[in-house]
Amino acid sequence: DTAVSQTPKYLVTQMGNDKSIKCEQNLGHDTMYWYKQDSKKFLKIMFSYNNKELIINETVPNRFSPKSPDKAHLNLHINSLELGDSAVYFCASSLPGTSSEQFFGPGTRLTVL
Amino acid sequence: RKEVEQDPGPFNVPEGATVAFNCTYSNSASQSFFWYRQDCRKEPKLLMSVYSSGNEDGRFTAQLNRASQYISLLIRDSKLSDSATYLCVVILNDYKLSFGAGTTVTVRA
């Protein structure tokens, strides 16, 4: 039973394209997150949603748009991809509040050429 | 100054050795602290929370020093399977958390 799943696992695309990454959790958590981990391994929070509502939106270009159709899903859509968007994107979920243990998905490795 | 800073290592130690490393944080109002473990090309997983009085989980001991604003992780009797990157996480409030860039530990036979 996969707790937090992401698709695709790998994504290779050209600059300027638009792509989406999907995330689903079956833990019954109310809170979901998107993180970006760059080549220096620095893991940075991008967005957090609680019960389908945005609660954290760090300084992220507005080319990135999260969408939460229900509390078990948090998808990430990226417009006009740039070279600097190449990274591993992790989805995570937790009980309410950032102090709760976060359960991460396996990551999506995005490469922009 | 970064919100959370860690010595990147790598700490290269023989099996059975003890290894310890710190993580410093900049905001004195930080409330909660955790250590996560990340294996190569895998997702981070919670290793342990860090409590004010210090806490132990098997071979792992975590300490918090609020006066000097750092947390530490000590691994006793290192196993090959302890080789990983250890991420420090500092929570300021329900809307603000920061990960360190990680400390890499390699345990050799």
Image: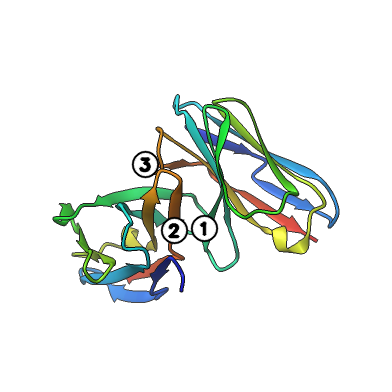
- Residue A38 location in percent, x, y? 60, 62
Q: Residues within 10 Å of mark 2 (few under 14, many from 20)?
A: many
* Residue linked to disc 3: A101
How far across and down, in percent of the image, does residue B20 sit? Answer: 25, 70
Checking the image for residue A62, the label placed there is none
Corner quadrant of residue A69: top right
Assign a secondary structure to mark 2: strand
Q: Secondary structure at mark 3?
A: loop
Q: What amino acid does circle 3 point to?
A: Glu
Residue B99: assigned label? 2
Please state if B20 lies on the left or on the right of B98 as rendered: left
Circle nearer the N terminus (3, 1)? 1
How far apart marks 2 and 3 lie (CA) works out to: 13 Å
- How far apart in space, not on screen, are marks 2 and 1 (Cα)? 6 Å
Residue B11 relative to residue A17: left or right: left
At label 1, the amino acid type is Leu
Residue B22 falls left or right of residue A16: left
- Residue at x-position 42% and y-position 42%: A102
Q: Could one spot residue A89 in this view of the protein?
A: yes
User: Pointer 1: what residue?
Assistant: A43
Kind of residue sitting beneath label 2: Phe
